[in-house]
Amino acid sequence: MGQLTVNSLGKAYKIYPSPGARLREWILPFAGPRHQEKWVLKDISFSVLPGETVALVGANGAGKSTLLKLICGTVKPSLGSMEIQGHIAALLELGMGFHPEFTGRQNVFMAGQLLGLHPSEIAQLMPVIEDFAEIGEAIDQPVRTYSSGMQMRLAFSVATAKRPDLLIIDEALSVGDAYFQHKSFDRIRQFKKLGSTLIIVSHDRTAIQSICDRAILLDKGKMIMEGEPEKVMDYYNALMSERESMVIKQIQLDSGQVQTISGTGEASIESIELLNSEDKVTDVIKVGEKTTIQVKAKINQAIPQLVLGFMIKDRFGQPVYGINTYRQQQTLSDLTPGQTANFQFEFNMNIGAANYSIAFSLSKGDSHLEKNYEWRDYGAVFHVINVGKEDFVGSAWLNAQTEIELEQGQ
């Protein structure tokens, strides 16, 4: 069983003003340092228990890849320590360890040995690797002729040919096609069920929330949050929007859920109401029922453009349906302080019986990343119940119409 404990880990690189300064420091060590230290990671502490799946999230340059390299031992820490139990398999940089002039088969033997496998064991696993990678005769062609997707297929197949105690994946799966991504995540889920410990770096919110038990958010080399994937991803989502003059706060709701509210405040949400087919405010909607969302927004400062969007999410935080007024070509322009904008969305609730939440966004354009006036998770929480519809399975009600024709035998 894989287990990882990280204690006050830090990594700094020496930055020299010139090659000569590096040489002088090496020749004259007692003359004092001639470099500056750049810390890419500092004071990182966490633990991953056996069988647990943890996501590392953060913007580019946050230190995620460096942290994985420290865990894998390809980079030495400047401070702190780690305790690792079990066999590690890692899929870091795409094609890492592959020689472009060697064939895929030859690279499998080299990469497998780097993972600690004996050549005879690799030979035994080769049919499994070939079958999972599905690159056909290309397995005996030089890797330089491979596309990035083919390299990823082969690298993942090698790294997971034998179930590791601890599997580490750094965004490599984002290169593959949709079919192989589904296939890869199925294998990851199987490993999880069998007790493997997983550490994954990804920007794919859906993947993180579907397979991870926890998420760790890194920002500028520091660990700023750790907790349930949806809570961390909501905060990360807010963090990625316009940072200047922006406020992020999280509120514990009576239901125990954590609501994230962020934004610069030029516009703000005053009220949110969910109405049923009788135009009554409710938190219970029937499958297929006409539903209305009413949102009142206040303009606090002069803004050139205002877009309201909403996203219905299931109880796991996965998106079910989202739309905004930009995509509906109903953007408001040239707004002044004191104005109030009343929005109303009408639709039939053609989704399955379950608990849902709605996130709302006031922004300048199609994405809150451009200019986030206010982002509000859990703006509304409601339940969908099935009354009078067939007992269907799934998250969407498609109202399938069935015709059956029975022919008599001759």
Image (cartoon, grey):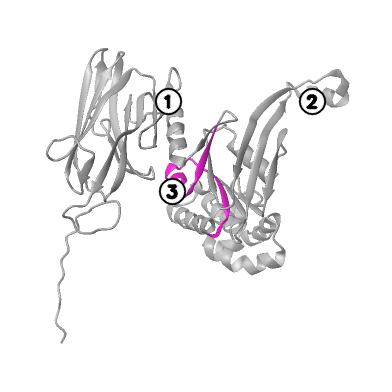
Q: Which amino acid does label 3 sit on?
A: Ser
Query: Within the image, what quadrant is residue 93 found in?
Result: top right
Residue 139 x/y as whole percent: 59, 62
Give the number of marks: 3
Residue 210 bears which disc, if any? 3
| Left or right, 55 with reference to 317 | right
The residues colored magenta run 194-218
Q: How far apart are marks 3 and 1 (CA)?
A: 25 Å
User: Is residue 300 or residue 329 the one in the foreground?
Assistant: 300
Of badges 3 and 1, the one in the foreground is 1
Q: From the viewer's perspective, is residue 287 above or below residue 226? A: below
Q: Residues within 10 Å of mark 2 (few under 14, many from 20)?
A: some
- The residue depicted at 69 percent of the width and 60 percent of the height is 117
Q: What residue type is labelled 2?
A: Arg
Image quadrant holding the C terminus, namely bottom left
Query: Within the image, what quadrant is residue 110 found in?
Result: bottom right
- Secondary structure of the residue carrying tag 1 is strand
For disc 1, the marked residue is 249
